[in-house]
Each structure stands twice: as C-alpha cells, then as structure tokens.
Image (cartoon, helix red, strand yellow):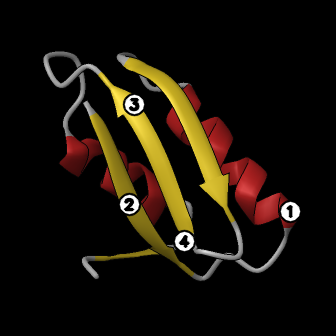
C-alpha cells in the first residue's frame, strides 16, 4: 500500500534524512520518498506488518508534525 503523509516542520536536508531513515527502518516498509518542498513522505508499506498510524507516530517521535490535508 502506498500512502502520502503530510509532514510539518521539515526545514533542511537533515530533516528529510531523519524522516527517511526512521521510516525506512520500520519492518514492512519497502520504499520511502521524502520531499522537502512539498512537505510530504510517500511510503510504500505492507499494512499487515506496519500501520499508517505507526508510521505517523514514528515521524512525530522525531519532533515533526503530521497533518491530514
């Protein structure tokens, strides 16, 4: 399943890398693309192994916000 997560608070390449690395390390995630200009993370994942809520929580634990646009 591919989902787009709106990320609030990213301001640089380090933020992008932090979000990318955190999501990529989750079991069940097959690919992650983070776009600083659009403030999104596009995640392809196996929903039987990880939930969208868990992915959003991972982003929030880094100190970023998550919104539903």
Q: Viewer-nearest of labels 3 and 1?
A: 3
Residue 26 image point, x, y percent: 44, 26
- Residue shown at 76% from the left, 49% from the top: 17
Mark sitting on residue 49: none
Q: Return the residue found at the far left.
A: 48
Q: Quadrant of residue 62?
A: bottom right
**Disc 2 crowd, CA 10 A, few/some/many (<14, 14-19, 20+):** many
Residue 44 image point, x, y percent: 39, 31
Disc 4: which residue: 63
Q: Secondary structure at mark 2?
A: strand
Which label's residue is closer to the chain start, 2 or 1?
2
Which label's residue is closer to the chain start, 1 or 4?
1
- Residue shown at 55% from the left, 25% from the top: 25
**Disc 1 crowd, CA 10 A, few/some/many (<14, 14-19, 20+):** few
- Residue shown at 74% from the left, 64% from the top: 15
Disc 1: which residue: 13
Q: CA distance from mark 3 to mark 1?
A: 21 Å
Disc 3: which residue: 44
Q: Secondary structure at mark 4?
A: loop
**Disc 3 crowd, CA 10 A, few/some/many (<14, 14-19, 20+):** some
Residue 7 image point, x, y percent: 49, 71
Which label's residue is closer to the chain start, 3 or 1?
1
Q: CA distance from mark 2 to mark 4?
A: 15 Å
Nearer-the-camera pick, 45 or 66? 45
């Amino acid at each position: 399943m591919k989902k787009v997560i709106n990320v609030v608070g990213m301001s640089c390449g380090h933020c992008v890398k932090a979000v990318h690395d955190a999501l990529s390390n989750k079991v069940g995630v097959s690919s992650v693309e983070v776009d600083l200009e659009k403030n999104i993370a596009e995640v392809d994942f196996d929903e039987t192994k990880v939930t969208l809520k868990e992915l959003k929580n991972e982003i929030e634990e880094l100190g970023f916000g998550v919104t539903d646009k």
